[in-house]
Image: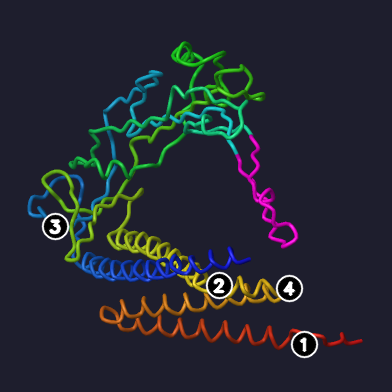
Amino acid sequence: MLEKIKSSIASVGFGLVATVGAVSLIWWNEGKAVKNAQDTEAAGGAFIEVSSDSVNNSNEGKLVVASGSATTDDVLTDPVFRISENAIKLERSVEMYQWREIEERNNNNSNNNSSNSNNRPTYRYESTWSSTPIDSSRFHESGHSNPPMRHRGNDLVATNVKMGAFRLSAPLIGQINQGNDRAVTEAELDNFRGELPGQVTLDNGKVYAGSGSPSSNQVGDYRIGFRVVTQPQDVTVLAQQRGNSFTAWVGANGKEFNRLEPGILSGEQMIQAEEEADATLKWGLRIGGIILMAIGIGMIFNPLKELADVIPLVGGLISAGIGFFAFLIALFISFVVMAIAWIAARPVMGIILLVVAAAAIVGLVMMAKKKNAGAPAAGAAPKG
């Protein structure tokens, strides 16, 4: 017990670091979100919609929205298996059937079972398809060896892709992803023999090599498939016109606009796509920051939890209470930090965040009070 208390005291330092780190992350994220919002608003008033049929030199250096059909004459050929396609991209996926190690631990924390043997991990092994090699030399038990993975996935991308009179830049070509699986034919199977172990067969358009039967996989078997990003296909670009191509348009706060979306879209729809991408990143980091802060605050109160564990039943209640309290504090601090970051740029947004923070705290406290009020008093006899 003394060792656990010492360990919990040490965790206080980690909790403080995690809490400060979470506040810093949220502050940085909100500052970036404010700047992105300002640049996107400026971009919404600056873009002009142009035709991709011809290059108008008067639009040089301006933020433009252009739509058209993306086409290429490039023929892409897989360097190993010699599969060829006239396409924007040719993607090869490779999987090998391998052993993987799974660690399992006994999480029984009962005081009556505190021997070290209870906390020793055990390992089990199962085979699975994996696109990356699994290093079996690190396994804790012998008898489950994976052979070297001779082949990996590979993506080929066309370099000469046009949209009307414009030539698309590499960053824009990289954003074209609509495509289909490309089935390997019987005539192409000879390209795989000699490169892959065992028997080579087709299975739903993919190449299967090894044991000879896709229904009875063995470690070391391969499964290889192809996908093509077809051409022509309609796309829309939001970027800065530079000669007969495009480059990133940079806002006053440093946000870059160099977006390609599938389909024929308006300028307003392209700006909306920028806003949605910013919102996804912003909320992902917000949620991550709140969780990190709640964990940090919970670690700060670990010594209290360990002390409470001495008393039967009380420890569990205290642990639950600490978790609830840590989440409340993390939620409140996070929304306050967000509000401060937004108040200068968008006062209404900042005020809304403050109101949300206050409402969240009040709501959660009321729920806790209601739960406590409904719980029977200790020692009280049940009704009826």
N-terminal-most mark, 4 or 3: 3
Q: Calculate the distance from the C-alpha at mark 1 to the C-alpha at mark 3.
A: 71 Å
Q: Calculate the distance from the C-alpha at mark 4 to the C-alpha at mark 1.
A: 17 Å
Count of marks placed on residues: 4
Residue on which disc 2 sits: 303
N-terminal-most mark, 2 or 3: 3
Q: Amino acid at mark 4?
A: Pro
Q: Amino acid at mark 2?
A: Pro
**Location of residue 110 by image quarter:** bottom right
Q: Secondary structure at mark 1?
A: loop
Q: Secondary structure at mark 4?
A: loop
Badge number at residue 377: 1
Quadrant containing the C terminus is bottom right
Q: Amino acid at mark 1?
A: Ala
Q: Amino acid at mark 3?
A: Lys
Mark 4 touches mark 3? (CB < 8 Å): no
Q: Residues within 10 Å of mark 3 (few under 14, many from 20)?
A: some
N-terminal-most mark, 1 or 3: 3
Mark 4 touches mark 1? (CB < 8 Å): no
N-terminal-most mark, 4 or 1: 4
Residue most extreme to the front: 2
In this rendering, the answer to whether 348 lies above or below 42 is below
Quadrant containing the N terminus is bottom right
Q: Secondary structure at mark 3?
A: loop
Residue 16: x percent and y percent?
Answer: 42, 70
N-terminal-most mark, 1 or 2: 2
